[in-house]
Amino acid sequence: MAKHNITLLPGDGIGPEITEAVQKILSAAAVDIHWEEHLAGKPAIEKHGDPLPNFVLESIKKNKVALKGPITTEVGKGFKSINVQLRKSLGLYASLRPAKTMPGVPTRYTNVDIIVVRENTEDLYSGIENEIAPGVIQASKIITRDASTKIALFAFKYAKDNGRKKVSAIHKANIMKLADGLFLTCCQEVAAKYPEIEYNEVIVDNCCMQLVMRPEQFDVMVLENLYGDIVSDLCAGLVGGLGVVPGANIGTDASLFEAVHGSAPDIAGQGLANPTALLLSAVMMLDHIGETKAAERIRNAVYRVLGEGKVLTKDLKGDATTGEFTDELIRYIIIK
Ligand code: NAI
């Protein structure tokens, strides 16, 4: 019997190519995983008549850990975002997005090391939208004491457990005095329980300017859902873009690890996709399930191959295919 049972959702577009690469690399690092593979999104509709069949959710609930490739969501029509459904159904309340400068990835700054903690379940993503009069749409922003306290606790605990020094709460409480005001009150209450961690508050627009000008001042950031969505992509841009940054959605009973980028239909099936972001998400997953040595080995191989700059995919200005890049990583993992 394998040591770990993990649900795998390869997704669509470039999803199957990059998940295959990641599976090969994890296997080269000798991590003993039984993958329970399921379709989701359009391929699941074609096969099962449902974009997110219940047995997929049951598989994740049973295994408590899932690795997911990107899933295409049509704009303005089609099925509801699978990502949002997964987060809601599995109670994945925290989105964790590290943005760290990597060797060999050209960026404006060399010293970015930010952890973005985004509340994943409420805010304007509650899906409550109404046409209250012809031509007038009302969208509701829901902020609760429970969810805000939970995400603040997650951010401070993460900071403490990982030797981080500071948590910044990002808000717009000068305008949304009640909603963002409640979020800040919850952050302040939690901050008081962690006197060893520095705490500050930054208004979201200023935060974006500060990130672009002096990103090194940020350590752990905690944000509501919408600000977190936007600011985490800004942070990804500071360290080389969506092709290289990992992500995790953490809940009390299950966790789902996925790249931040989408299904890249423009390059799907051409061997051009960069598997780094999904691979680093899988590395976060390995840390999460206690396979810290394998995680370190793979992380070092990624830094080394990127740092050398000889075998890189097209998005990083190289000419290697997904397969060649994967094989180069495996070479380092096996040599080690
Ligand atoms: P995208 O991230 O798929 O692509 C944006 C650009 O980045 C494209 O030029 C693409 O070729 C490139 N790119 C993305 N990942 C890459 C990789 N690993 N290697 C090399 N190049 C890469 O964003 P887009 O085009 O806005 O979305 C496409 C679809 O993906 C949409 O249906 C969207 O809803 C979905 N999506 C799914 C996500 C998920 O499942 N977590 C997240 C974001 C978008």
Image (tube, rainbow, N blue to C red):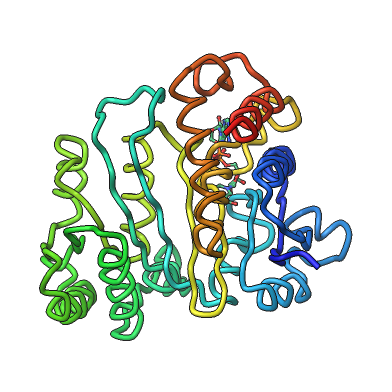
Query: Can residue 298 be spotted in the picture?
Result: yes
x%, y% of residue 30? 68, 48
- Work out whether 292 lies above or below 314: below
Q: Quadrant of the C terminus?
A: top right
- Work out whether 116 lies above or below 179: above
x%, y% of residue 178? 18, 78
x%, y% of residue 39? 78, 58
Q: For ligand 1, give the image quadrant.
A: top right
The image quadrant of residue 325 is top right
> What residue is at 52 percent from the left and 25 percent from the top?
305
The image quadrant of residue 312 is top right
Q: Nearer the viewer, residue 113 or 82?
A: 113
Q: Residue extending furthest front?
A: 336
- How many numbered marks, from 0 up? 0
Q: Residue extending furthest bottom?
A: 146
| Image position of 24 (left or right of 197) | right
Q: Nearer the viewer, residue 112 or 295?
A: 295
Query: Can residue 130 be spotted in the picture?
Result: no
> What residue is at 38 percent from the left and 41 percent from the top?
236
> What residue is at 81 percent from the left and 60 percent from the top?
45
